[in-house]
Image (spheres, helix red, strand yellow):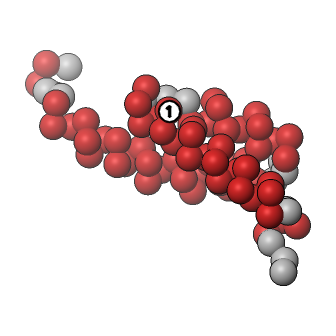
Amino acid sequence: MTYPFDLSLVELIFISILLFVSAAIQGILGFGFAVISSPILVQIEPLLVPQILSLLALPMAFRIYQREKKGSRLETV
């Protein structure tokens, strides 16, 4: 069985757990997805960093915006 970027199954599982933890920290603190995941992903496969982070960060940021817009008042900004 071939995996993308010729990664082993253990590496794919580790990357999945890393991205899950990074996304959880992003959801709790409001930042941290790229700060946590990119230095570790570069060590595993440098080509993954721009693609994975771009594809996953945009929907996650949009979801956080939807969650937080109820509690913000734009007229006070």
Quick check: 52 left or right of 77? right
Question: What residue is rendered at 65% in x and 32% in y?
Answer: 36
Disc 1 residue crowd, few under 14, some 14–19, many 20+, Cα 10 Å: some
Q: Nearer the viewer, residue 74 or 60?
A: 60
From the image, which quarter does the C terminus lie in? top left
From the image, which quarter does the N terminus lie in? bottom right
Quick check: 5 left or right of 25? right
Above or below: residue 4 compared with residue 28: below
Quick check: 72 left or right of 42? left
Above or below: residue 36 compared with residue 49: above
Task: Give the percent coordinates (x, y) of residue 4.
Answer: 79, 69
Q: Nearer the viewer, residue 50 or 71?
A: 71
Above or below: residue 58 compared with residue 32: below
Question: What residue is rendered at 65% in x and 43% in y?
Answer: 18
Query: In the displayed image of the protein, which residue is found farthest to the top?
Result: 76
Quick check: 54 left or right of 77? right
Q: How many numbered marks have been drawn onto this rendered protein structure? A: 1
Q: Secondary structure at mark 1?
A: helix
Task: Give the percent coordinates (x, y) of residue 67.
Answer: 26, 42
Question: What residue is rendered at 80% in x and 55% in y?
Answer: 11
Query: In the displayed image of the protein, which residue is found farthest to the bottom?
Result: 1
Q: Quadrant of residue 6?
A: bottom right
Q: Quadrant of residue 37?
A: top right
Question: What residue is rendered at 85% in x and 62% in y?
Answer: 7
Task: Give the percent coordinates (x, y) of residue 53.
Answer: 62, 48
Q: Nearer the viewer, residue 28 or 77?
A: 28
At label 1, the amino acid type is Ile
Query: Which residue is denoted by mark 1 in the rendering?
Result: 25
